Structures are given as C-alpha cells and as structure tokens.
Image: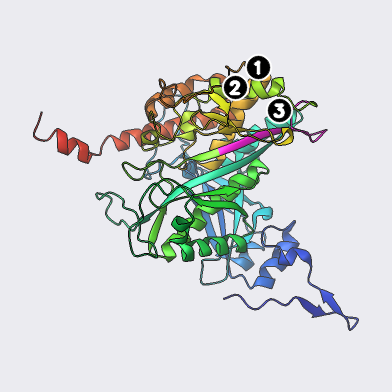
Amino acid sequence: MPPEKKEVRPSSRGGRARTPAFLKSERGVKNWKEASAWLEWRGIEDIECITPDQAGVARGKMMPSKKFTSNTSLALPSAVFMTTISGGYPEDGNGFHYPEDDGDLKLLPDLSTLTVVPWEEDPTAAVICDLVHQDGRSVEFTPRNVLRRVLAAYDDRGLRPVVAPEIEFYLVRKNPDPDYPLTPPVGRSGRPIGGGAGYSIAGVNEFDELIDDIYHFSERQGLEIDTLIHEEGAGQLEINLRHGNPIELADQVFMFKRTIREAALKHEIYATFMAKPIQGQPGSAMHIHQSIVDKKTGKNIFSAEDGSETDAFFHFIGGMQKHVPNALVMFAPYVNSYRRLTQAASAPVNTKWGYDNRTTAFRVPRSDPAARRVENRIPSSDANPYLALAASLACGLIGITKKEKASAPVLTTANEDEIDLPRSLLEAVDLFEGDKELGAILGKSFAATFAAIKRAEFETFMEVISPWEREYLLLNV
C-alpha cells in the first residue's frame, strides 16, 4: 500500500501550507516537475509506459519511477504496430512494406494521462505515450496518432468534435480451454445468469462486489462513469461515459477495458469485449455519440439558431452513410465481429438513419438543439477505440466537406431489410482499400498497414477447423 498522504505540511514561516492541488489530482499533471512531485507524494515505485497497438492492446515498458523522471529515452520496435492479434506479421504488398531494419520508435509520455494502477499490490502508476520517429516526426500508422490526424483535419476547418462512447461487455466464467464455449458466470444468487435482463437492477446487483471494484478502480484513476446498466445478454453489462474530447475519451475506453478485466479477474471470472462471445446471445457494441462544435462560437453546428437541423447535420449523416461501409473494418475488425452483424438482431446491418430509431445504423437521440448528436451504432466493442472514433469522425467530415446528401429518415424497423454492409472481413478490407478519400484523411501508411494486418489475421483464422465443420462435414460429405 502507498504511504499515507499528508494533506498539510509545516511552512518555513511556522504556519501550515496547503497541499498543491496537482498532487491530489487523480489523473494527469502539467509538466515533469509536477510529475516527480506527484510520484513521490504517492510513494510510486514503478511506472507502466503504455500505448495502444492496432488491436487496442496495451504495449510498452515498465521501469522504476526514478528512472522515468531522469530524462530516460524510451523506445519500442516499429514492428509492435504491425503485429496481428495472434502475434504474427503480414506479408508485404498492396502498399504495405515491413521495415527491413525494424527500427525503434520513441515513446513520448503524455503527462496529462498519468494515474495510479489501483489493482497492483506495489505502488504503481501508468502513463499513456505517443510515438514519434527518432527525428521527431509523428508516426502516421499508430492508433493515437491516427485519431490526432483526423482531429487536426477538423481543427483546420475551425471545428471541434465532441464524442461519448458506450461500451458493452460480457462477464463469463473462466475458460482456460478455448475449445469449449463460453458460459455465463454465477452471481451472488448462486445461479448462472440468464438473458433477457435488460436494465435489470437485480441483474446488476448479482455482481455488486465486482461492480464496486470497477467503480473504485475507476475513481482511483480519475475515470468517470456516467451510468452502468445490465444489457439484454446473460451477464452483459454496459458502461456509458460522459461526452468530451475524442482523444481523452479514447484514452478512457482504453483504460476502462484494462480496469474491467482486472476487476473481473479479482473475482475469478473473465470480462470479454468480443463482439459475439456466446452463441444465441446479443453481441456487444461500442456506440459512439458525436456532435461538432464551432471553435469560435462554441455552438453545435448541427443546430441552427431557431433550433432546426442545419445542412452540416445532414451532410455529416450523408458522409456516414456513404463511407462507413468502407470503414467497417475499423468498426468490426475481426472475423468474430461479423457474427454480431446479422439481420433481425439488435445490431444494425444497414446505412439508414432515423430519429430515436435503434434499428438504424445512425440514430439521432431525442435532445434539445444544443445537444443534437448522431449516434453511430455499428461499431462493436472489440474495436480499437482510437480507430473507431477516427473512422467515424472521418466519415462525417468527408460528408461535411463534400456536402454529401443524407437519405430521408426511417420511421419503421430497418434491421430486417437487406444488408448494406460487408458480410465478411475480407470484403470489408477490399472496400477499405478502395476508398481513397477515407485513406487520405486517415493516412496512407496507416491504411496500408491496417489492411495488411487484417488480411494476415483472416489467413490465420482459416487455418482453424471449427466445431461446425466437424459436426456437419465429418461424416456427411
């Protein structure tokens, strides 16, 4: 346990001086001087210097806190950001070329993200890092930089996006053998959790102690949960975050995933963000609420002075309708993701939009004009939050700049209509590579790298023989 913190200390004049506010901040400091004092005040021994890879997995280095504050140069091999989820590497081609020297990329700690790691026994802190080349140039293909690139495109036009993600996930029994299906966990009642418990308070209460740990861990890291609910699936929960800056919200999702997994492990169960972990149960989404603010006026550009929708609002939706199918691989990045995107399910498989219509891909929630926003309901919870936000905002920005027209809003059930989205990972990769406008705003180097990784992951998946094949083909064909 960290040493007890002192709120006041004697001053040189014999009085009592207040503890500086930055020392008590749960998340972030302004500079290295504050960082040293913050770490010392908490008795921090170790620092995790982490950054998200293409899958959103935390990569990085751990070091003693004294070394962290001694101007130590940090680096990671560039290959870390070209790795598949199974640890392999893609083949060269289609614009992707594996660097022959596998040179290092420099890690630059973003001190505004400095926070404790509450589940560690020894006093430990973590900081999210950006990546640059050795000469200081930004690395185009790393996820945090991809999102920064999209935000810079908005900034060039005097605009500032505001987002609010919602993340669904499942709690499941420990499953050390991947050949066996996942099953719901046992709650405090002693019985396995059943489905159909959407918004059930009793369903949430089944995991009171675990949820208390999630809240406790979150508070210690300065992460703010807006609401937590039980979703329709057996043991499926959803966390909603407050709206804000896209980089900060992507950082929060990145940290929340770690936090929820650690809290679940403390209670001998798994938390999974797979898009479709259990057959016959609903999939897990990461819905993204989006609005755009004029930087000069601070007003939502989706609403006119009289409260009506603006042309920019409809153009943003038009851009989403046109380009989201081409960006689907960033919202549904794995073979499993497409098991969630099926007709007559809770996930939309169309490019339609509507007012408060949850069967459409793009829902406009009921709100006052100042809070008018567009909810992208397509992303699954397995998506890298940085890349999902980057892709969604990029599609909307293309619509605004190209003045894309939106279709008429849908007033009826839309998820039983024909499918407007790619049905498989490879089809999604093909569409992604063919959208030059999307590639230009995301960065050509990233687009080529991400597509190569996804093709390699598909080939790895094709090496596995599934239970379905053994059941229906073994003795019948």
Q: CA distance from mark 1 to mark 3?
A: 16 Å
Nearer to me, 446 or 183: 183
Dots 2, 3 in contact, CB < 8 A: no
- What is the number of the mark on residue 302? 3
Q: Earlier in the sequence, mark 1 or mark 3?
A: 3
If you read the primary sequence from the N terminus, does the residue marked by circle 1 or circle 2 appear first?
2
- x%, y% of residue 354? 57, 26
Disc number lying in front (1 or 3): 3
Q: From this viewpoint, is residue 346 visible?
A: yes
Circles 1 and 2 in contact, beta carbons < 8 Å: yes
User: How crowded is the residue under tag 3: few (<14 C-alpha within 10 Å), some, or many (20+)?
Assistant: many
The picture places residue 411, in percent across and down from the top left corner, at 54, 23
Q: Front-most of 104 and 213?
A: 213
Magenta residue check for 179: no
Check disc 1 and report the residue beneath it.
Answer: 402
Question: Element type at marker 2?
Answer: helix
Q: Percent from the top left, x then y, of residue 306?
A: 79, 26
- Residue 459, horizontal then vertical, whole percent: 32, 33
State which quarter of the image contains the N terminus.
bottom right
Q: CA distance from mark 1 to mark 2?
A: 8 Å
**View extreme (bottom): residue:** 14
Element type where label 3 sits in the image: loop
Which residue is rendered at x = 56% and y = 45% of the image?
A: 105
Magenta stretch, residue numbers: 288-304
Q: Residue at x 53, y 32 (%)?
A: 446
Residue type at mark 2 is Gly
Gap between marks 2 and 3 measured at Cα: 14 Å
Residue position marked by numbered label 2 in the rendering: 319
Q: Which mark's residue is nearer the viewer, 2 or 3? A: 3
Q: Amino acid at mark 1?
A: Lys
